[in-house]
Structures are given as structure tokens and as C-alpha cells.
Image (cartoon, rainbow, N blue to C red):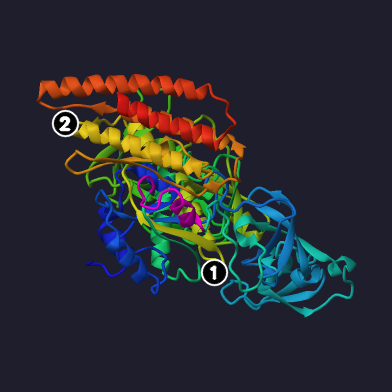
Amino acid sequence: MRFPTFAECWHENPTAHEFADQERMKTGAFKCCFIGVLGVAPCALPQIMLAIHNYKPELVTQDIVTCIELGMDQRQSLFDFNYNDRVIVVRDVLRKSLINQKGVLKGGFDGGNMIEMSEVLEKQIRQVTKGSFVRVIHTTNALYMHEGTAQQDGGLDGWCEVKIDSKVYTIPTMWIESISTAESRNSTWENKACVKIIHEQIVPEHAPDTCMAFQGDGNVDIIDIIAKFDPDSKITPKIFRAVDISMREWSDQTQKNAVIDSMCQQHARDPSKFFHEEHLVGNTDVHFNWEGCTGTQSIFESGENVIFYVDTTSPRVRAQALIGWSVNARDEIQWELPRHHKAGNTQPILQRDTSLIVVGCRIAHRYDYTRTGRIWELIDSNDWHSPVTTCLVEWDKVSGAYSIPSNIIVEEEIASLERSVLIRKVAIPPSLMWGTIQDYYGHHAPEYVLVEFQSNSSMGVSMRQAWFNLKQLNYRRLWHKLQVFMSYPWRTARFTVQERVGISIESLEYNKCKLEVNTVDALHNLCEAIVCFCHGAALMHRKNITHCDLHPGNITITQSADGESFCIKMIDFDRMKERPVSSQTRYFHIDLLSIVHGLCIVVQGVQCLSQDQNDVHHISSKISRLSCKLTAMQREVASMPSVCSHITTANYLLGTSEKIHSV
């Protein structure tokens, strides 16, 4: 209660929002404060709080959980469309005429789609005719108010080549205006525009000013379905509220950012589990549509016009590798140190030269401009045929992942270093550039990747190449995509407020955890919990209801603080369905198979640490008999017909509870 908002508590008291069972996070569950039920409208919060206050479960409710479903499939791309889908363009930096316009998806490319617009004509995008006189009107551009001639019709990509003072520049069409128009105009300009648009700039078509239908699997009436077989929440978590809310109604951006941070962190830990198609690999395109993306660039990887020199007046000066630079060959050279050095002879630096790395010079990491230091010593290879390949570096103390204490000398490969004057930070202007990650060899992704920028504009030509930290690039790209996904005001998310139940049986097995049962009473209560669960699942099937996604990861077990009581419940009801009467389906069999398999894991994971040898013998003996019985039942269920009726599985579950009692 010390924190007035969810976001403040999230950042100041992070342990209050962490699950012991981290596997729960991948399904979008977030442990949250009692006062901070995510996304719920203020008018609805008192009702939910009252329901929580009045609820008295058999076991103490450990946490309140808000399960947030954003309507995306984490196994696919965040923005997933099919051919002929009708869509709305919601953002485009270069082509304002496309915003809020409808179209049909007609094709795809790496990172985007080809959209045939319903009402936008080519002339509304092209704007500039080949041969017309134009003026640059973008106030922050270096060519502001310069005039020139269009060398082509304005492109459907939002760019146009303009010749200004005998030089051709590729400039966004929205940055220029026509002074006079050439007489000829292409007749195709009256056609409907067919344009390339990246994924995150479109959403599925829906009625104006109405929320998009929820795109996930969940049922709105899930509480009503559960109430038909488990009104007292004996084998399912108590659900206090399930509601669909638009992103406009969920107005707290700090809450959204906290959710995005959590999802990005989970993805960074294991990209193979979270958002399977949202991690970058070699030879794929990156569209820089987000702020704050920085890389490292050597002058030898850029299209910069600055010319660099080394003083070759004497061997002694050359050994010091004194470097200078000028904008062109006629300008006065500005030297590294001292700034006003006078050189007798100079030589242009045309390519990367490791001999420029000398003792005492300031250097930077070739792939990371934030890592700077000074050469302490060159290490002799003891082979006069081999060049010096390593050196000792005194790195500056910096914050972040590469924090190194001052005065610590580290051995480094010279190939990974560059003179600091030859390295620069690169900031990518959002939405104006895209590039391709250069392919790399080996199964493991490298720490840094080289991105080659496309020469579709003068910016791409001048940038050419830059190095980026692959993890940071992945993180920033995913963060941006999630932020875009959650910013569209008419997109619907689903919130389910419920009690949190213990650890999943899958996690129990995966983490090799043991379930401590140290008294005969505790063992009796565990068996009763199993019987209760089987009775509840049998009633679910008798009501013709199937879970449709039941597996050990969706079955949980909770143990009381004193270790004496247990409760087994099923979770994650997004796909639960009520079947027609007397229907036969494989889902009844899948539910049954998963339940018996899960109970086997529970029983086999029991251990007794009691000091009473009589209790140890009794518990071990009974657990051994239970394990054998359930293992035999598992084989029996596996041999049953996969398509069966609800009566068959319900009766088997009731029989299972009787067998547990008889052991």
C-alpha cells in the first residue's frame, strides 16, 4: 500500500511481482498488488476487491493474479496476416495519405506486406512529377529552402530523387514541395495505389470507432462454463472477474510499459520459448522504426566524405600514428593531438590498418563505441614472421554490461580494437532506414552483428554499414513492436483476475523438485486432494465440457504452509469448450491421459523426511503402491480409443478415485 500505482511498485518493489514458478510468466500471468489490478476500470475495482475480500478458500489464497491476454500467438509473429485480409493502415511516417485508410493484403516481403489500397490513388502518394522544380521545406534538413529538379516521379515508397546544385539527393516526398510542375503526367497515377507497408503499421479492418474483436482463444463466458462443474472452485482457481478492455480504456501507459519490460526480459532469457518468430537471425531485414537505436561505425564502413591522414614525415612520428582529418583534400587538416600539429608529409588512410594501434593511443572497441580505453602495451608474438596480434588495454570505467574497474589491465585482440578517432556512435533516424543483418557462421549467434543499410535513399548511401549488439537490437525491436501493438486504442485485451494456485506439475518435474510428505495425515490429505481432483474432472466431462489444453503445465499443486494440506487444480481455460450432448471427441481422451500422467508425476515426486521411521516406512510403502497403480493406469489409458464419449472418461476418472482410496 506504500505505492500509489502499479508501475511504482513494479520498479521499487520487484520481488512483490515475481513468481517462484517462472514458467507461469510465459502464459501472460502477472502477480500484482491488491490495489493495482491491471487494466481494470476504476469503477469496477471496488466490486472486484469486495469479491476477493468475501472469498474464503479452503487454502489461503497466495496471490491475486491478473492474466493479461493481448490477443497474440506467441508461437508466431506479433503481427500475423494472411493474403486477402482486409486491413487498416494506422501509421506511416513518410506517406501521411495512407493513415486510417483501408486496403487488402496482396503479398508479402521480409518484414511487411504488399497492400492494395481501397481508396488511395497513386497521385496522392507520388505528389512530385519528374522534371518539376521543387523546394526542400523540411526545416531541420541541411538542404532547407534549397531548390532543384525532380529526377523521377515521386515513388510509392515515399522517396524522390532531386538534383540540387549538380548533386542528386534521395529525399522523402513529404519534405519537398513543387514550385512548378512538368507538363507530362503518367496516366497510371489515377490507379489505386499498391504499396509496401511493414507489419506493425496495419491492423485488421473493423468498424470505425469500435473495438476490434478479441483475437485470442479465450471465451468471454468462461466463468459461466466453469460454474457448471466447479461452482466452489475446488479444482479450478477462483476467478473474480474476466473482462475485455480496449487499449483506450487501459489508459495507464506506465502499467503497459511494465508489462512490456517483463515480456521483453522473458524473451531475452529464452528466445526459443517466448515469441518464437521475434528474434533476429543472419541475412534478415531490420526496419528501424524505433527511437534510441544506436550502433558503432568505423569510418571505413561509412560513406562519410571526411578524409583521414597519418603523418609520415619521419619514422618516429609514423610510429606514434598521429592522425588528422579534413572534409576534403583542400581543407586544413585537424590533428588528433596536438590539434595544430604541422606535418611535412601526409598520407591518406584508405583502409583499416592495425599498425595505427600504438602504445598510449586512445582506442575504442571496434563493435561497441561505449567501451573506450588506452593501449598499455603491445604483446610481442616472439615470432618475427608474425605480426603483433594482442595488446594490453587499460579500459575506462563504464556503467552497464561491460563495467570494468579503473586501472585494470586486460589483454585484447588488436583485431577487435580501433583508434577512437576512427570510431563513432551511429543513431538511426526512426522509419527512414532499413538494413540487412550480415549472415554469420556457426550455430550460436554472435555478440555483435554487422548491418548493411540499403541504398534506397541518400541516408542509406551515407551510412553503408554499422555494428550493433544483437541482444540490444532484439530487445529494442521487440519492445517497439509490443509498444505499437498495445498503443492502438481500438485493440482489445482480455483480463482475468483470479487467485494464484501453486506450482505447475510440469515445473515440479522439470526442476526436479520434491513434494515433502512427512506425516501420515499429510499423505492422507494428498490422496484426498487427488480424489477431489478426479471427482471434479469427472463432473467436468459429465457436463460435456473439455479443457482442450490440459497437460502437466496446466495442472498445479498447492501445499499449505505447515505442509499438511494439498490442493490440485487445473488452470488456463482459454480453449475450454462445452460439447454437444453425446458427442465423441479426442479431447476427452487427451484430458484423461494428461490427468493420469500428471498424477504419476506428483506421486513419484513425493519424499518423506520424517524422523519417525514408522512414518517413513508407512508413507514409502503407500507411495510405492500408488505409483505402481497409476503407472499401470497410464498404460491402460494410452491403449484406449483416442476418440471416445464423455461417459467413458468420466466413469474412468471416478474409478480412479476409488482405486486411490483402496491403496
Of 39 and 168, nearer the camera is 39
Residue 381 seen anywhere in this rendered image of the structure: yes
Circle 2 sits in a helix, a strand or a loop, which is it?
A: loop
Task: Find disc 1 in the rendering and name its residue.
Answer: 489
- At 39% from the left edge and 66% from the top edge, which residue is drawn? 254
- The residue that disc 2 covers is 519
**Closer to us: 101 or 196:** 101
Give the residue furthest to the left. 611
Give the magenta-colored segment's residue range. 221-236
Visible residue check, residue 344: no
Say whether residue 303 is magenta. Answer: no
Q: Find residue 550 and report its horizontal and vertical position in percent.
A: 47, 39
Q: Nearer the viewer, residue 316 or 291?
A: 291
Rendered image quadrant of residue 393: top left
Whole-percent x, y for residue 512 in the image: 31, 29
Using the image, determine if residue 241 lies above or below residue 345: below
Q: Quadrant of the N terminus?
A: bottom left
